[in-house]
């Protein structure tokens, strides 16, 4: 997939969330690394910031949190009806995710 075929990352992240029951930012990064891993904004801090922004805009909601193997808190999210509506309404017709 070329860069011209990529959605803006947050749009792709919301699309990704519409296809899974729940995910943490690290899980999303693992799953989207093949598409976006070469981008300089593809960092743990930025992806967490994207999730927090989507949560503030009621596009995702926190479902649970746990400690990972390193002792860090891993927060999981699921998409909301508002998030699904945005995916349905604004995802470009050419995109086949």
Image (cartoon, rainbow, N blue to C red):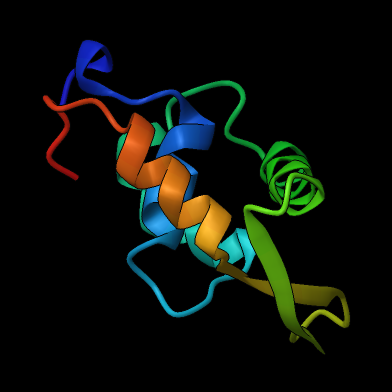
Q: Nearer the viewer, residue 81 or 6?
A: 81
Q: Quadrant of the C terminus?
A: top left
Is 36 placed left or right of 48 in the picture? left
Nearer to the camera, 93 or 23? 93
Query: Which percent across, then down, holds residue 6?
Result: 29, 24
Residue sitting nearer the eye, 59 or 66: 59
Is 68 above or below relative to 1?
A: below
Residue 2 location in percent, x, y?
18, 18
> Is residue 75 left or right of 43 when viewed as pictured?
right
Q: Quadrant of residue 72?
A: bottom right
Residue 43 is drawn in which quadrant? top right
Instruction: Tell me: 62 left or right of 21.
Output: right
Res 29 seen here? no
Quadrant including the N terminus = top left
* Residue 23 locus on image (x, y percent): 54, 71
Q: Which residue is at the far top?
A: 4
Residue 97 shows up from this direction: yes
User: Which residue corresponds to the image point at 74% horizontal and 49% vertical from the top-left?
Assistant: 48
The spot of residue 58 in percent (x, y) is: 71, 54
Give the residue displayed 75% in from the left and 54% down from the top: 55
Q: From the viewer's perspective, is residue 22 above or below residue 59?
A: below
Residue displayed at 58% across by 21% down: 40
Q: Up-down: is 60 above or below 57?
A: below
Q: Relative to residue 33, is residue 50 drawn left or right?
A: right
Say above or below: 16 vs 49.
below
């Amino acid at each position: 997939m070329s860069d011209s075929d990529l959605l803006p990352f947050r749009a792709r992240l919301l699309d990704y969330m519409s296809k899974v029951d729940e995910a943490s930012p690290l899980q999303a990064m693992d799953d989207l690394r093949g598409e976006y891993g070469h981008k300089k904004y593809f960092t743990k801090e930025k992806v967490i910031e994207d999730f927090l922004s989507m949560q503030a805009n009621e596009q995702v909601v926190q479902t649970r949190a746990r400690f990972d193997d390193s002792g860090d808190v891993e927060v999981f999210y699921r998409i909301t009806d508002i998030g699904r509506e945005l995916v349905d309404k604004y995802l470009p017709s050419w995109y086949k995710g």
